[in-house]
Image: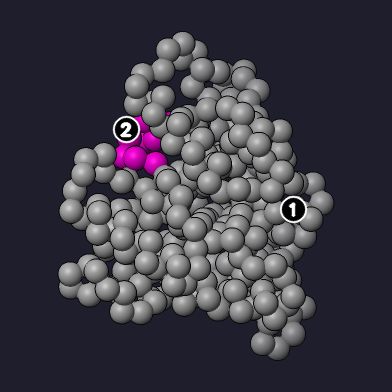
Amino acid sequence: MAHIIVVGNEKGGAGKSTVSMHVASALARLGHKVGTLDLDLRQRTMGRYVENRQAFLKKSGLDLPSATCHDLPEIDQSALKPGENVYDHRLSAAIARLEPENDFILIDCPGSHTRLSQVAHSLADTLITPLNDSFVDFDLLARIDARGEKILGPSVYSEMVWNARQLRAQAGLKPIDWVVIRNRVGTQRMVNKEKMQRAIDMLSSRIGFRVAPGFSERVVFRELFPRGLTLLDLKDIGVKQLNISNIAARQELRDMMKALKLPGVEIDF
């Protein structure tokens, strides 16, 4: 069976689609077959990212390792039983279609609470939650005191993950490996950065997630999106010498992929 990776966070702007595209493309470069689903049916950032890539590669005559992106199939609603949800069936049908032909299925969730996102979390073998280095984003995981030093209790997103874990346990499935990715962490030693580190460490042991390094704020990510490219594609499109920022970003990607500990994946880029 394909290993299902879900990238989720109920807050926009945390870098979900950037993380999704780089994880999917890195796995494809390592020789794995990867199918992706974008559950943000309105904005479709991940879907557009993949479409941009397909268009750029076709125009440039390049053939680079890539993940595939798939739409949710339509379901005949008249065939549903009373109380059944059409989105549940659309997602189940998509997974059933992708599983036989892929090693990994990556699902990019919207930055809001939706039925699709809720169901997707219960399907996750690995859950990746990108989080900006800010207590505004941290509030999605847990409530914290005014000094930023004491966890008062879990917040809405953590409760949703807990419910997803319960559903998996009831179905006899293995537990979710939940990994929180810290994005946009400052390079300088700052009080807020150190408080965030302590809070994340406290919360990780309390509600059960691992912490992994993410991406710093870099202009290159905004430049890559229109062409559907990732950091790993730069040399293939003619960039002969990477600048210091791009080299650092590639190292961040390497560190992140290693920290995810995905089954059967050996990082050699």
User: For the residue marked with disc 1, what is the amino acid?
Assistant: Ala
Residue at numbered disc 2: 219
Q: Using residue 259 as the reference point, say whether residue 215 is left or right of it.
A: left
**Quadrant assignment, res 156:** bottom left
Is 262 in the magenta? no
Number of callouts in the render? 2
Is 221 in the magenta? yes
Mark 1 residue element: loop
Quarter that holds the C terminus: top right
Contact (Cβ within 8 Å) of mark 1 with mark 2: no
Dot 1 or dot 2: first in sequence order is: 1
**What's the CA distance linking mark 1 and mark 2?**
34 Å
Query: What is the span of residues highlighted in magenta in the rendered image?
Result: 215-225
Q: Position of residue 173 (x, y in %)?
A: 72, 70
Kindly report the secondary structure that dominates the magenta region of the rendered protein.
helix
Numbered circle sitting on residue 191: none
Is residue 74 depicted above or below 67 in this figure? below
Quarter that holds the N terminus: bottom right
Report if residue 226 is visible in the image.
no
User: For the residue marked with disc 2, what is the amino acid?
Assistant: Val
Q: Position of residue 126 (x, y in %)?
A: 60, 57
Q: Residue at x 39, y 77 (%)?
A: 154
Labels 1, 2: front one: 1
Q: Position of residue 253 (x, y in %)?
A: 48, 37
Is residue 128 depicted above or below 175 in this figure? above
Residue at numbered disc 1: 2
Q: Residues within 10 Å of mark 1 (few under 14, many from 20)?
A: some
Q: Residue at x 61, y 29 (%)?
A: 268
